[in-house]
Amino acid sequence: MIFAGRKMTWVLRFAIVAAAGLTALLIVAGPSMAASNEGPPVILEISEGGYASEWYDLEVSVEGDMARGTAFWAMDDDYPDRMEEMEDTGASFYVHILLDDVEDGPHTLWVVVYNSTGTTVTDSVVIDVDNHSPYVEAITNHSTIHGDFVFEGRAVDPYLNESAVYCLIDGDETSSKANVMTKVGDHFEFTVDATTMTDGEHLARIWAFDLWGNSNKSHAIVLFVSNKANLVITNVDWTKTKVEAGKDVVAVVTVKNEGGTTASDFKVSILEGDKAVGSSKVTDPLGPGESRDVTVKWSMDEEDSREMYIAVDTGEDVEESKEDDNQWPEPQTVTFEGGSPGFGMVLAIFAVALVALLASGRRRR
């Protein structure tokens, strides 16, 4: 046991002397005698690229053969002239990059690592910046619809998920996930089946997602569903507004059926206040989307001016989706003037004059 202890003491002393000698040799000989101290730094690991929004953490792990140096980073065209130093955390180099002012789209982050002798190594990673939700716009106008109706809208984003662009009806997000819009040229379309909807007003929007789950909804447009008939006046042309008393004022009225059911046997009327004073009846069927010109007339025997309106379905003969849009909003003043005396009037005047003349002759006698 004494021999073993002496042997162990000798081995320990030899190891210490050998280590000291090797250290001295390396100091004297320099790097040429130590292969482990030669060569550039090595980037072992760099942050993964991919989607980034608002900020991104860039980190690199470095193994250098020489003494530890520094690391710098730059984005896109800032490399290599405008690079910034990264923080040395001891285990890695790190920088927290704010992306608020960075344009959406792909960007390259460059990393350059220096060792103590100035030897460098370069690496890069690509990030896809998306700070914004998709831009969306409903391009369909407010409309009265029936049957199939094509709703249109635009959705724009560098990372737009084209399979997640929806027609959102009445804010029902769950049901609207089935309303996937189809890209047609520079916009998206969806065919709305109005027959599955109740008559009345509905709100439609385009609702779009990007690949990262950001979403946006457009302003709402009003779709008035009219599966029943819906008679409206689209134009009024008063062809005669100033006539002699006893003759007709005349208006040509364009009536359109904006509903989804054919209408017939309804009246188009001239109104004085709420009273229909002159009417024409439409007996032939007026189908969905069809228009027809209807002529209406009215006369009065005395000299006067009146303010008149035009309305359709004044007898409420047609069941409509909407009953409060039958009247043309603009009134028209019509005038009946005194005219030239007719033959009967001339005879009456002549008779009065003759009677007066005979009476005058009798008085002279």
Image (cartoon, grey):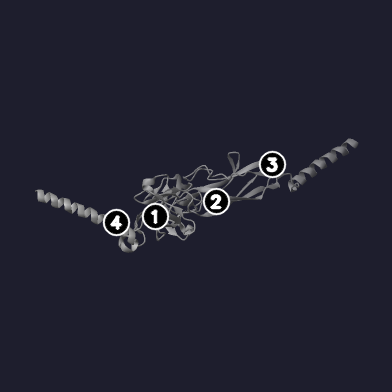
- How far apart, in angstroms, are the residues tagged by discs 2 and 1? 85 Å
What residue is disc 1 on? 69
Viewer-nearest of discs 3 and 2 = 2
Secondary structure at badge 2 equals strand
What residue is disc 3 on? 305
Q: Residue at x 20, y 55 (%)?
A: 14
Instruction: Examine the image and state in which quarter residue 110 appears.
Output: bottom left
Expressed as whole percent of the image width and height from the top left, the position of residue 246 reads: 68, 45
Mark 2 / mark 1, whichever is N-terminal: 1
- How far apart, in angstroms, are the residues tagged by discs 2 and 4? 106 Å
Mark 4 / mark 3, whichever is N-terminal: 4
- How far apart, in angstroms, are the residues tagged by discs 1 and 4? 23 Å
The answer to whether residue 227 is seen in the rendering is no
Disc on res. 255:
2
The three-letter amino acid code for the residue at tag 2 is Val
What residue is disc 4 on? 23
